[in-house]
Image (spheres, grey):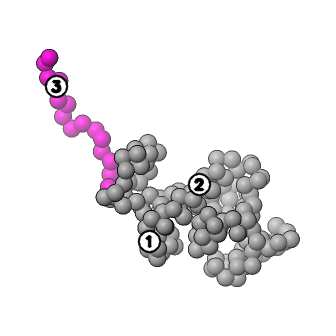
Amino acid sequence: RLEEFSGARELAAARTDLVNATKVLRRLADAPSNVKLHEMRCDVLRRMVGEDLFFAFEAAGFEPQASGASSADAGGAAAEGDDTVGGALASATSLRWRGGEEAKALLGAALHEVQRAGDLCLDPDTVSFAQVSELVQQNRTLPGIEEVNDSVAAPVEPKPA
């Protein structure tokens, strides 16, 4: 679905939303015990990433929650398998992260995939040196490059002074 999301939009706009989603997911992954990050208001997420990217948060272990709904109610809505923009998600006022080991694993996988999709939206012809340096330092995928090989094939002797 991330490919569909990126393909349906201008690459720069898709990258912006994917980078914003990556920041939110990374913050939770770095501090999963911070309960303030367990619930995200849908109106705020819509401004940050757009509603079309809510599926990434559901894949990360978030469940739709209507105002005043308990966690049990939210779990029931997610259990129906409604991952469309309509249904339970359309009436939700927030997304609540389930927590626990299974949710941490889902969060890690979703974070990796959202980040990778954002990286693939970079234009290899216009990517800056700073962006390439950041991607290489973090051992992330470079757009248009299948494998980074920075080893020296044959050492060259220095020129005498």
> Of the residues tagged 2 and 1, which is closer to the observer?
1
Q: Quadrant of residue 123?
A: bottom left
Mark 1–mark 3 Cα distance, whole angstroms, equals 48 Å
Residue designated by label 1: 10
First reached walking from the N terminus: tag 1 or tag 3? 1
Q: Looking at the picture, which amino acid does disc 3 mark?
A: Glu
Q: Residue at x 58, y 60 (%)?
A: 21
The first of marks 2 and 1 along the sequence is: 1
Q: Tell me which residue sits at (59%, 54%) in the image.
A: 23
Write down the residue under mark 3: 157
The answer to whether residue 63 is seen in the rendering is no
**Which span is picked out in magenta?**
145-161
Does 122 appear in magenta? no
Q: In the rendered structure, which disc, 3 or 2, sits on the residue that comes first in sequence? A: 2
Task: Identify the main secondary structure in magenta.
Answer: loop
Residue at the limit of the structure toward the top, as seen here: 161
Note whether 96 is above or below 81 in the view shown. above
- Give how far across and how far down residue 105 sits, in percent: 62, 56
Left or right of 156? Residue 40 is right
